[in-house]
Image (tube, helix red, strand yellow):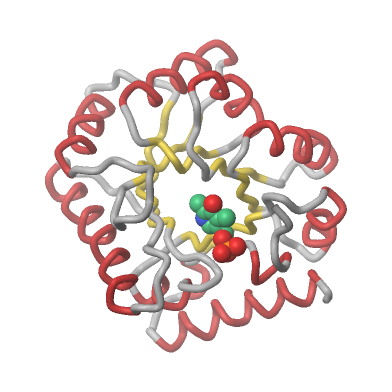
């Protein structure tokens, strides 16, 4: 199996799906999810022109990406997994975006650590749209509460870019689509209610990115279709 070829296949798929639903393919970013895959495998994709990556564990991300980013400064890393408080310090050093913000406390920690190193951090608010996911804000009110604090300029080092979600693990296309449209509606509602212009919808993985793009995804997070099965 050739990872660089897989990458090109996925890129072509994204273009085709976007065109079929009359979206501009350039409005969809491919986040290559490299968790459990080696630095060598990641470098194969960097050399094939992939510059945006996602990892869900900070320690693993640091081990692999410190050197990669040193060597290729245009590589950007998003943290996409649940982030524990004691990992925030290392996370803000390595990441350009934290997609898994799901509490006020976590946002405060990120703000604090970023202020210490004077770094601005992009974040997405993760929203719980599926029964079997454990992470994410579980109610609209909770999310709005934190968004309001952000709008009162309590987080000078944070830039909220949009929302992220995980669809349920199911073959039921309707349930998956419902999860993605819930997130899109929430973004539209937030923009309206708070006069915002949030753009990013991080949704869609190897098995469901077609549906996600049809429902407005701007970031698809794809691991298996690029790197193959993970050996946990
Ligand atoms: C692992 C992971 C992905 C990628 O999943 P694949 O099915 O391998 O494409 C996407 N998003 C999150 C949050 C993940 O943890």
Image position of 141 (left or right of 230): left
Where residue 163 sits: x, y (%)? 35, 49
Where residue 172 sits: x, y (%)? 34, 78
Q: Which residue: 46% across, 14% down? A: 112
Q: Which residue: 71% across, 37% down? A: 60
Q: Is 134 located above or below residue 173 in the figure?
A: above
Q: Is 210 located above or below residue 49 in the figure?
A: below
Q: Quarter of the image holding residue 3? A: bottom right
Marks counted in the figure total: 0
Q: Which residue in the rendered view is the most extreme toward the bottom?
A: 20
Where residue 153 sits: x, y (%)? 28, 21
Quadrant (top left, top right, bottom left, bottom right) of the N terminus: bottom right
Q: Which residue in the rendered view is the most extreme toward the top?
A: 116
Q: Quarter of the image holding residue 33? A: bottom right
In this view of the protein, which residue sits in the foreground, 218 or 110?
110
| Ligand 1 visible in quadrant | bottom right
Q: Decide if residue 222 is in sight here.
A: no
Q: Decide if residue 37 is in sight here.
A: yes
Where residue 17 sits: x, y (%)? 48, 83
In this view of the protein, which residue sits in the foreground, 199 or 38?
38
Image position of 106 (left or right of 1): left
Q: Which residue: 68% across, 80% down? A: 9
Q: Is 150 located above or below residue 65 in the figure?
A: above
Q: Which residue: 32% across, 65% down? A: 180
């Amino acid at each position: 199996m050739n990872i660089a070829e897989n990458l090109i296949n996925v890129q072509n798929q994204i273009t085709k799906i976007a065109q079929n639903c009359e979206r501009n393919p350039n409005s969809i970013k491919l986040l290559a999810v490299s968790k459990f895959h080696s630095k060598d495998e990641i470098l194969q994709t960097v050399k094939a022109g992939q510059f945006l990556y996602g990892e869900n564990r900070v320690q693993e991300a640091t081990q692999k990406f410190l050197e990669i980013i040193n060597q290729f400064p245009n590589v950007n890393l998003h943290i996409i997994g649940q982030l524990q408080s004691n990992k925030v310090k290392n996370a803000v050093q390595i990441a350009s975006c934290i997609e898994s913000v799901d509490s006020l406390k976590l946002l405060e920690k990120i703000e604090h650590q970023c202020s210490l190193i004077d770094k601005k951090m992009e974040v997405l608010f993760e929203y719980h749209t599926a029964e079997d996911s454990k992470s994410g804000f579980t109610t609209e009110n909770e999310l709005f509460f934190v968004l309001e604090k952000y709008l009162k300029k309590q987080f000078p080092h944070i830039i909220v870019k949009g929302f992220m979600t995980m669809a349920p693990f199911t073959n039921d296309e309707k349930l998956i689509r419902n999860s993605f449209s819930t997130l899109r509606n929430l973004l539209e509602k937030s923009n309206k209610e708070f006069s915002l212009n949030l753009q990013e919808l991080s949704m869609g993985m190897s098995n469901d990115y077609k549906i996600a793009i049809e429902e407005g995804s701007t970031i698809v997070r794809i691991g298996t279709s690029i790197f193959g099965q993970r050996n946990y």
